[in-house]
Image (spheres, rainbow, N blue to C red):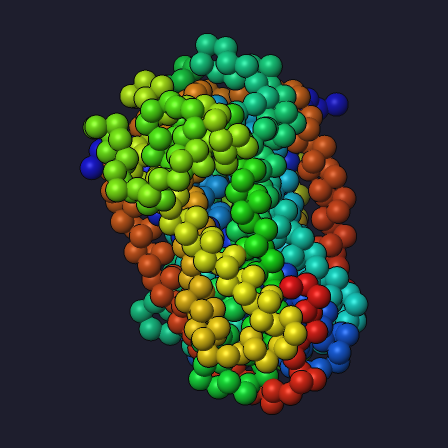
Amino acid sequence: MPTLPTLAAGCILASLVLYALTGGADFGGGVWELLNHGPRAEARKRLIIHAIGPVWETNHVWVIIAVVVLFTAFPRAFAVLSTALFVPLTLVLAGIVLRGSAFAFHAHRPHEEGGAGWWGGVFAGASLFTPFLLGVVLGAVSTGAVRGEGPSSLVGGTGAWLAPFPLSVGGLALASSAYLAAVYLILETDDPELKEDFRRRALGALALVSLLSAAIPFLSAGGAPEFHRDLTGSWWSVPLMGANALAALGAVVSLSTRAYPLARACAAAQVTLLLAGWGMAQHPYLVRPDLPISSSAASPEMLRLLLIILAAGGVLLFPAIYLLFRVFKKKALFGG
Amino acid sequence: MAELDLARAQMAMLFAFHILFAVAGMGMPVLMVLAECAHLRTRKPVYAELARRWGRGTAVLFAVGAVSGTVLSFELGLLWPRFMEFAGGVIGLPFALEGFAFFTEAIFLGIYLYGWDKVPPPLHLAAGCLVALGGILSGVFVVASNAWMNSPAGFTLLGGRPADVSPLAAMANPGWKTEAIHMTLAAFAASGFAVAGIHAFRLLREPRNGFHRVALGIALSVGGVAAVLQPVSGDMSARFLARNQPVKLAAMEGQFRTQRGAPLRIGGLPDPAEETTRYAIEIPGALSLLAFHDPDAEVVGLSAFPRDERPNPVPVHLAFQVMVGCGIALAAVGAAGAILGWKRRERLFSRPFLCAVVACGPLGLLAVEAGWVVTELGRQPWVIHKVMRTSDAVTPVSGLALPFAFFTIIYLALGVFAVRFLRKEMAESPFFPAGDGDSPTVSGEV
């Protein structure tokens, strides 16, 4: 039976996975809006907005859950991360604000705000740097350069995130968002030309995701040595990487044979396995090397109540989310 | 400016912006649900159109509130890491509950907005009700953590850290009930009057448009009821402060001397150096009466506290005057509306009354901002009352002018876009002929 702090840390990871699979894909939709050129550009843009509209707000809440569980269950880690990674986190917030509000203006008044001009560029640019910097933050947490030793010391901002390893994790997060979005969007339309458009994009993004997924274990050797040791030297390392490679292969085959629901399952599995791998290599630390999960947690009383709330909330929440997706993603998700 | 002042200025700016949208997120869904109820009961298309349009406004205001709220949840740590290190493990629960309330709001707002033709009417209405419930609960939970900063509970202090933590006792802190009621009523009054003001403005131009008439009726009912009830809640808050946070009450009232039969000061300017409040209209014994329901009761003054534990009474007193002034204006117009509209609804649409409603449009939001200034500046120099000083909570990161400027520019642009969006929505409002049958039938709620 895992301990209370491990369960709480697991909840943070689960929220991040759900955020990547839903909100991440919404940012990925913004990436394709930004790179939208050539024939059928207008139709693609409409499809993206139409697909994201009803679920945007709900998907966004996962990141709030992650941060709330982090500061409730691991207040010290929240303080350490907030100071050390002040700059990338501030930029992430700017990206969330710009993309979120631009999306709302745009979705409810198409052909106007948030679509064109200089601000349009800023808004679309937010779709690029937000998932990128979120990935950079995850990478930086593993480098060992974010320090929080001593009972009350807080060092100022660090430049640890401006290193090849965290930046490549950022690149992987961005590529994964775009990849998920492209795969999901294939199933959102009946237009065969649009399907082909996004199929090509999905294959391109998949190549990039695979390349970065393969490169990161090597990059981590220099940039995050202890993380590297656990990522590559644990009993689960080979099965995990094998499963990831299998999912990638499955995605290639199913995209090539146009078996789209299977492609979506493979893509979601890839992203889940990437984050699970990060979490397992990070275990038993929340922030390497000073904040182990076990000793930086809030009181057991708080953890117990928090986990009860999360469980009870989940029981109410998941049926509601199911209803939401059932109403708006009936065809894409439920095939009818 | 010192880094601490920059951090405080940034936090104040982020809150001042967010609270407007948070208030709309609590109040607007109630308006849109009432419009839909009226439609289901009367089958008149004007109500359906109104519910759709209010829903669209809600969506945009909610979206901006959602992202600016996300910013705040991170900025708590970015600007005040030592506060969060202390408080996270004590008062985190209401934030987690707020997360789920927020989820409810987001999920069912999606169903509400995009589901008009996709889900059956009862389910659609239920979705709207859940949006409203989620909005209200979000506010109530978040306020629990602010109330805890004013009346900390659920832990003992051991070597500067919290020990014996009881998260439920922290959440159920003594200040929660009064603050939550006050904030919820404020949200309904502010959004009700802001919406009523907009529709009254349009009615001055096209007095026969039934669309704006029914809209005004619903918005004014909600805003008016809340505004009339708010003084009761304000009285509860004042009495709570008199017992639990007397230094804040003293700053609000410009009361320097501890005295029996303390007067209520209307207006005036506190002078901290001379320890007196000048130019105020004083009503003898009235402060004692309000704070303790006894005209001879003793009210503790600011001078009873060490100088480095006093808030600056100048902004606190002035903001308090603004809040109360706005609140009284709203309650008066709300009551006048109830009396005017009671017998003959037509009288609500007379020019003088419409002008009064237009004038009240911004006052509710102004009162919310002023009230926030009162409660936040009135708690200084503490971030957690008598437990942690704001200056001890601030981040060691320097160069805070940059993020402050950065977010100010972004929020200014966002504010401009939001206002432009709402103006365009208003400019395209439809015309429905005004007839007796079209007047709103929610008068029972006035």
Q: Is residue B214 above or below residue B4?
A: below
Picture coordinates of residue B243, whole percent (x, y)? 51, 25
Residue found 45% across the figure and 50% down from its top: B368
Residue found 33% across the figure and 73% down from its top: A117
Regarding residue B269, the answer to whether it shows in the image is yes
In this orientation, which residue lies closer to the viewer: B358 or B156?
B358
Q: Is residue A31 above or below residue B340?
A: above
Picture coordinates of residue A79, whole percent (x, y)? 44, 29
* Location of residue A188 (image quadrant): bottom right
Where is the C terminus of chain A found, in terms of image quarters?
bottom right
Left or right, A246 with respect to A115, comes to right
Left or right, B190 with respect to B51, comes to left
Regarding residue B52, the answer to whether it shows in the image is no
In this orientation, which residue lies closer to the viewer: A21 or A49?
A49
In this orientation, which residue lies closer to the viewer: A329 or B140?
B140
Residue found 38% across the figure and 74% down from its top: A116
Left or right, B390 with respect to A30, comes to left
Picture coordinates of residue A299, whole percent (x, y)? 61, 20
Residue found 38% across the figure and 22% down from its top: B258
Where is the N terminus of chain A found, in terms of image quarters?
top right
